[in-house]
Amino acid sequence: MNKHCTADFQIVAEQALANTARSPDSLVSIFPSNPQLSQVFQFIETNYNQPISLSDVAVAVGYCAAYLTDLVRRNTGYTVNDWIVERRMVAARTLLLETDQCVSQVAQAVGYQHEGYFFRQFRRHHGITPKAFRKTQRS
């Protein structure tokens, strides 16, 4: 995703989170409300903290990966992998701000097996490193 798409995606996800957070009975979620994709988003929500991929999601919901990619992109404008990364980034931001876990622990907690990959994803997504994010947000 380029920087403009990442910013737009983050805005959409934050608006969805804000809208669902208003209702105490609803599952607080970054995902759009779409009955056709509810199983996809539920699987991501339940498993984002594990190493999951597009093929894992596709198997879980009973679609081939290519069809699922097209379906999700057509309905949301983003790919399954984009949604997995966005859900992980929401959790990572929360952990960085609300805990003193080191970056490698945060990476593991949100489903990344390799700290370096998490670091690159976080920087690509936010334009800042996880440590710098924590420092600037806490000061």
Image (spheres, rainbow, N blue to C red):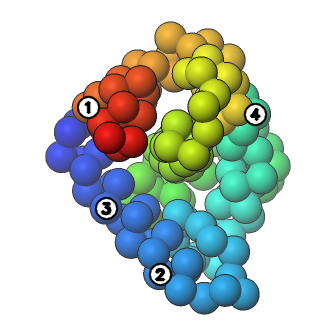
Residue to which mark 1 is pinned:
127
Q: Which residue is mark 2?
A: 19
- The kind of residue on which mark 2 rests is Asn
Q: Earlier in the sequence, mark 4 or mark 2?
A: 2
Residue 14, above or below 120 = below
- Name which residue lies at 41% across and 24% down: 131
- The residue at 32%/41% (across/down) is 139
Image location of residue 86, percent across then percent down: 49, 47
User: In the shown orientation, is residue 139 left or right of residue 70?
Assistant: left
Residue 91 % position (x, y): 58, 46
Image depth: mark 1 or mark 4 in front: 1
Which of the 4 quarters of the picture holds residue 132?
top left
Residue at image x 34%, y 55%? 9
Residue 50, numbered circle: 4
Badge 3: residue crowd in 10 Å (few <14, some 14–19, many ≥20):
few
Q: Quadrant of residue 133?
A: top left
In the rendered structure, the answer to whether residue 118 lies left or right of residue 25 reads left
- Is residue 72 shown above or below 90? below
